[in-house]
Amino acid sequence: MSKNNHIPSDKDRELARKTGQLLKKGEPLSGLSDSEAADLLRLKKGLRGYPEKELTESRSRSWEKVRSEIQKSSNKSPSTKKKDTPVHRIGFGSPYWKVAAVLLVVVLLSVFIYTLDSDEPVQIAQAIDENITVSLGDGTAATLRPNSSLYEITRDEDRDVYRLEGEAFFSVTKQENRAFIVNAGSGYIEVMGTEFNINTWDDSTRVYLETGALLISSADQSDQKILQPGQIASISNDFRITTPAEADGHSVTAWKRNELILDNRRSGSVFRELENHYSIQIEASDSVRNEILGGSLSLADQNSTLQNLAVVLDGEFQSIEGYRYKFVSFE
């Protein structure tokens, strides 16, 4: 089942940028207005529950700057005697309410808003063990497959630029004179209102167009191709783009329905897809990897998926370690 997440508004992003710049420059947090601090507290309430493990190293640096700022505020206290610090309810009338607001919020904001290193791509969405759907700033919907991440590179009046690691399906909101660009693997995909699927796993970037029009460019700009609806093309690591070919969209986007279509697929290809989907490793002989499979396979649960596939291949997947499996044939 997909989760729905929402990317913050431009106003919230600007607030995060301003907070970050104050901390980066070492300026006092009193530079925030009352309304901005109130917005920070509102965001804090809306973000309650984000796991701490989502914080990256750069976001941790943001937190350290917040703590440093709070320490500086404490050092300015007229008190000269060390004593226990009582717990107070801090309201907007307190001189410390702005510091408290940032203390409570900045780390949570850093889960999905700009870090202090604003020139670096910023992770705005990450699918861990199930599909998630996020709404981007322009209304575009992006559905991420497990073990996939989406980063924002640029948002300005002319274009939205993102980077994808893994696989995702985009339903792009059409905007006149504004481009939507995805940096994926060895190339760029540029659209203006369309629906398409990108897969950056393995040794190439595969792009499938469902509706609209789409331009694929290699990262070194040496090759370009235009896809028509129902076509698929790949960008290799040496920046070559294959000739667009017709594809079965039902099969390409089956992962959105938590299934794999196995019609005439070698089991080795299925193994690779499961390795990416579940972040596991599968060991199997060449003879098993060359088996041709048919039908479909549910992705609803890792154990069930492996058990069902093992039945088809007449064997079992034995766990070697937490993430490694070996297929053993019954023959």
Image (cartoon, rainbow, N blue to C red):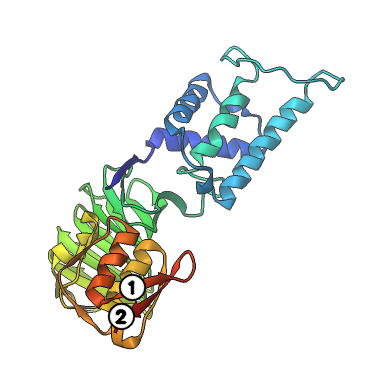
Question: Which residue is drawn at the image coordinates 59% and 52% (left, top)?
Answer: 57
Question: Which residue is drawn at the image coordinates 41% and 64% (left, top)?
Answer: 279
CA gap, disc 1 and disc 2: 8 Å
* Label 1 crowd (10 A; few <14 / some 14-19 / many >=20): some
- Looking at the picture, tell me which residue is in the foreground, 54 or 234: 54
Q: Provide the residue designation for mark 1.
A: 316
Q: How many marks?
A: 2
Residue 234's place in the image compared with 39, above or below, is below
Along the horizontal axis of the image, is 38 left or right of 138?
Answer: right
**Residue 226: % across, % down:** 19, 69
- Counting residues from the start of the chain, the first of labels 1 and 2 encountered is 1
- Looking at the picture, tell me which residue is in the foreground, 16 or 107: 107
Which quadrant of the view contains residue 244? bottom left
Q: Provide the residue designation for mark 2.
A: 330
Residue 298's place in the image compared with 320, above or below, is above
Circles 1 and 2, Cβ within 8 Å, touching? The answer is yes
Question: Which residue is drawn at the image coordinates 28% and 54% (left, top)?
Answer: 179
**Residue 154: % across, % down:** 41, 51
- Looking at the picture, tell me which residue is in the foreground, 123 or 255: 255
Residue 17's place in the image compared with 313, above or below, is above
**Residue 147: % across, % down:** 39, 59
Along the horizontal axis of the image, is 55 left or right of 65?
Answer: left
* Label 2 crowd (10 A; few <14 / some 14-19 / many >=20): few
- Looking at the picture, tell me which residue is in the foreground, 149 or 19: 149
